[in-house]
Image (cartoon, coloured by chain):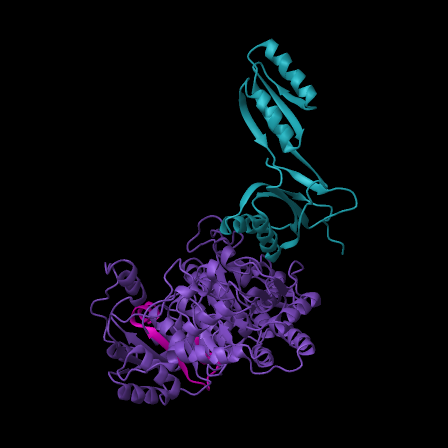
Chain colours: A purple, B cyan
Amino acid sequence: MTKMSGAKALLESLEQQNVDVIFGILGGAILPVYDALCGNEKIRHILARHEQGAAHAAEGYARASGRVGVCMATSGPGATNLVTGIANAYMDSSPMIAITGQVPSTNVNSSYMIGRDAFQEADIIGITTPITKHNYQPRTIAEIQPMVNAAFYIASTGRPGPVLIDLPKNVQSDVADVVVNINKIEARGYKPALQPDLTKISEAANLLANSEYPFILAGGGVISANASDELMQMSDLMMAPVATTFMGKGAFPEGHPLSLGSIGMHGNPAANRLLGEADVLLAIGTRFSDRATANLDTFAPNAKKIHIDIDAAEIGKNIEVDVPIVGDAKVSLKLLHDAVTKKLPKMKVSAWSKRVKEAKEQLSPLLKDRPKELVPKALLMELRKLLPENTIVTTEVGQNQMWSALYFQALKPRTFISSGGLGTMGFGFPAAIGAKVACPDRAVVDIAGDGSFIMTEQELACSVAEKIPVIVIVLNNSVLGMVAQWQRTLYNRRYMAVNLGKTPDFVKLAEAYGAQGLRARSIEEFQKAVKTALNSEVTTVIDVPIGSEQDVVPFVPPGCGLPQQRGDY
Amino acid sequence: MEAGKTKVISVLVENKPGVLHGVSNLFRRRNFNIESITVGPSEQSEIARMTITVNGDEKTLEQVVKQLAKLIDVLKVEELEPGHFVMRELALIKVNVPTPKERSDIINCVEVFRGRIIDVSIDSLTVEITGTPDKLDAFLNLMKTNGVIELARTGITALARGAKTVRIDE
């Protein structure tokens, strides 16, 4: 037993979880924790300039490193500003801990307490219940460490996700005798399923061994489970083409002959086409989101479907499957690989592999002509050449994101980080800051649009002050491009509220924050700017003016199926 | 209640604040329809039992069970097998009684339905009646002619029959 404050108990618990960084902004109701942080040498605090930035940075840190990201804010508006970031982490299954201050849980010195609408009180437990894996509000100091242990365990295991800990101010500041360094985890209702059912593995192996046109679809779960090697072995064994969902981008090297890029609304047409020809679909760690599958009636209509997922609730939620496998992607793929190997000693080059090669040559956008002028396709293909393989790329949301999906090849897992499920504009830049903190020796680039970048651009102040140099490439078209594209193609060019007018001068904006601002108007200027940025010790914003009427094509219109992808590209 | 469409689920949860919120919030968020939900202590301390009746097809029900099971404070979820469980609901019904003739009619009715009269006033009777929701519906239907002043129904609570249980054995 050691006498300490709740705030100190929190920090000790975080240290025990090997937390080395917290992204946050302080305020009245979290002051005791910040007081305890003062002089702490194990945990670095990075002061964001808006709590949303802190949350996205924590997620960027988590997704780049595979470790749990931690963000912190005060009560009320601090907590509610985290909400978008928490919802984002929930949708994209990222391990994250959000710590919020709360008004006191009991009446201390006549101060208002929980439930009395105290100053900066918000019911963050109620607000975040539908967007967290779990949340906690300790009422005694003794509860803190077991709750922190459970929070990290829940956030990082099974299907990862955010967990919130809401700490009433009196619990932070009170002093009590507490037992430290306990390993107890109190979460008896939480039992992540890791080991799959072997009879299902065997059924799946039978289907795969007898298939002529196998197709592998890898989702974000493959990245979460660090199962890329197992995915590669499975693909090698079957000579099966691999497409990813948008969230799975990077799970399989996109330069590989069997890689088809991503499926989906703005997916690679080769992937969308071949999926329709497959006789067995092996889907791993994907929730079959509407943007990936489009209209379900024409989704892989000829394929028997095997679905591996660690979350039993994802199986049968959006599509019916023939063989459900609930388990960890890495463990399941290993078992499945061994089971298929026994039934299929040697795989030969088949008609299917020839068909895959042919479809890629005919349909893959990257194998078509590359424009000479500085348009998104040329820029992103050039960027791939300029960046080292291990560079971490984040994106904002909208056209910049879909162009990146189509034209920027991700070669390794955890090198492509984007807001897939929630589609949060403003995610990419703070996520890049978080990724850079996790991987300081690697280059980190945010592929942005002007509309998205403006949403969290204030974090330039954070990146400069905290010396976290990242590169932001602003594809500047002075419109909210994706919605403008929809208005152009689906609303008969009736443009409403998409024109950004005179956007800020991003070079001057960067300079105003003490960052480096560069502008590129040609491929040559772009090459030069990226090289300068890669060698810079300060964050660099590269403004790239592009036309305002560029579409992301091809595209599956809403309500249509993947085979109805259209548009010249 | 339409047979086969309404499912009864027995759920064991941590008996602590916020758990009911988590469960009801899940139903709202996932667009599931709850017909009724009842909560109370179970045979084990610190564990509460919820009995939830939901309306939907097999696929929806499967999602209800799986999504409930994901909640950290939910310890066990099981659909009670149709025909192999007992269920009861309790209703308190305050009925309008303008004349002595009607009073005796109602008392007869209550006897037939094995209910009890638990409060009497000059122009009203309060009846306690327990049974399956169908039985309660039938009784209520009879009372409608007299005029129901107030009605309170608990929603159903249920247990599996015989050796079959939904419990946590430590």
Pick whichever, A48 or A259, lies toward us. Answer: A259
Q: Residue furthest left?
A: A502
Who is closer to the viewer here, A137 or A228?
A228
Name the residue rendered at 29%, 82% in the picture: A371
- The answer to whether B23 is drawn above or below residue A514 in the figure is above
- Image coords of residue A459 (percent x, y): 36, 73
Query: How far from the left and from the top, in percent, is residue B86?
Result: 71, 38
In this rendering, would B120 be left or right of A42? right
Nearest the viewer among A426 and A219 is: A219
Q: Quadrant of residue A530?
A: bottom left
> Can the viewer see residue A160 in this picture?
yes
Q: Is residue A446 magenta?
A: yes
**Quick check: can you spot residue A5?**
no
Q: Position of residue A328 (x, y in %)?
A: 62, 70
**Which of the 4 image quadrants contains residue A68?**
bottom right
Q: Quadrant of the C terminus of chain B?
A: bottom right
- Measuring from the top left, give residue A398's x and y in whole percent: 35, 68
Q: Between residues A138 and B112, which one lies in front from this camera angle? A: B112
Position of residue A500 relative to residue B87, above or below, is below
Quarter of the rendering containing residue A140: bottom right
Which residue reaches farthest front?
A351
Numbered range of the magenta stretch: A434-457
Residue under the point 69% across and 19% down:
B111
Is B32 placed left or right of A397 in the picture?
right
Q: Residue at x 20, y 69 (%)?
A: A502
